[in-house]
Amino acid sequence: MSRQRRIRMAWVGAIAVPLLVLATYGVATAAGHGNAAKPAPGGGSASPGNPNGSSSCGPIPALNPQSFPASPSVTSTFNPLVPGTQTFLDGVVIDKSGVKHPHRITDTITDLTKVIDGVHTILIYEQDTQDSQLQESELWFGAQDSSGQVWLFGEYPEEYSGGQVTGAPATWLSAVAGAHAGLVMLANPQTGTPTYRQGIAPAVGFEDCATVFQTGQHACVSSGCYDNVLVTDEFAPNDPKGGHQRKFYAPGIGTIQVGAAGGVDPETLQLTKAGKLCAAAFSQIRQQASAQDQRAYTVAKNVWAGSPPAAQTLTAQLSC
């Protein structure tokens, strides 16, 4: 599932609302998922017959592998990816009977890297749970170029049922089967700048786009209040029923809120906790992420076969 679709999680006949009953946590230095938020297959779509995607998002961004460092470092103000940090976005899904189901998206920035389309990227490990049951476990890959733009290079979203992997049909990597990396965060987001592509993968029907909607905002969520917040409007141009998302990014934190602007089964999530992990917990997550990367060579072998395994090459900033 794509970064955009990941947050736009759609349950038939369900609506998600903020989970405000969780404890409020103080926020330390934390990393945000642009995409974020998680982003279900088919949520954003690019017509297989149109490999260049929708023209409403402008041209596919030009990728120059030489503009990325050999050791990835994502220091973006609004979308930092600092190894060792973890964030929680929480909401509640309401089913047709009116029953509330807690929903959580957990992002951990690992110290693992993977070379994709000639670029060294950071592996982010994301888990999507509902009623404390794992629905999806995803690896996504980000990198920042010399101009400060943050890119998305691919995703491996394993779907789960009853605790078992059922497949990963929305897997894509830049340069495989016509897929192309896209921008998840501009270097200097300003209103009035053109809409930009966040990635395109025609083979799995993924195309997401974003526009800078507001800057300099004040926003309060479960974890606290933030100034100088950036708000983007994100959408899948070939999925009009999906509506738009408004994502709120706080400086030095990343995503603090995701809200719906139209569409079916909208979801709203808020940041409830963010901070650095202890060494033992981080080591366990690294092992899980590495094992999932290895599993992709079997589950999604047509996409993963040409990529090198993820490797531990970065230094994590841990709390203990």
Image (cartoon, rainbow, N blue to C red):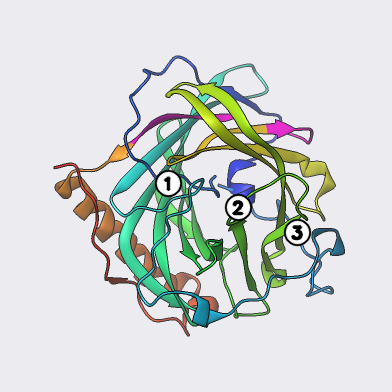
Are circles 2 and 3 on residues that touch, CB within 8 Å? no
- For the residue labelled by badge 2, is the local secondary structure a helix, a strand or a loop? loop
Q: Look at the image and tell me in which quarter the C terminus lies.
A: top left
Tag 1: amino acid: Gln
Q: Point out residue 166 in the picture as x, y percentages from the top left corner.
A: 49, 57
Which residue is tagged 2?
188
- Residue plotted at (62% across, 61% down): 183
Give the residue drawn at x 80%, y 59%. Answer: 57
Residue ID for mark 1: 127
Q: Amino acid at mark 3?
A: Ser
Name the one closer to the observer, 256 or 2.
Answer: 256
Tag in front: 2 or 3: 2
Tag of residue 45: 3
The N terminus sits in image quarter: bottom right
68 relative to 265, above or below: below
For numbered disc 3, what is the local secondary structure? loop
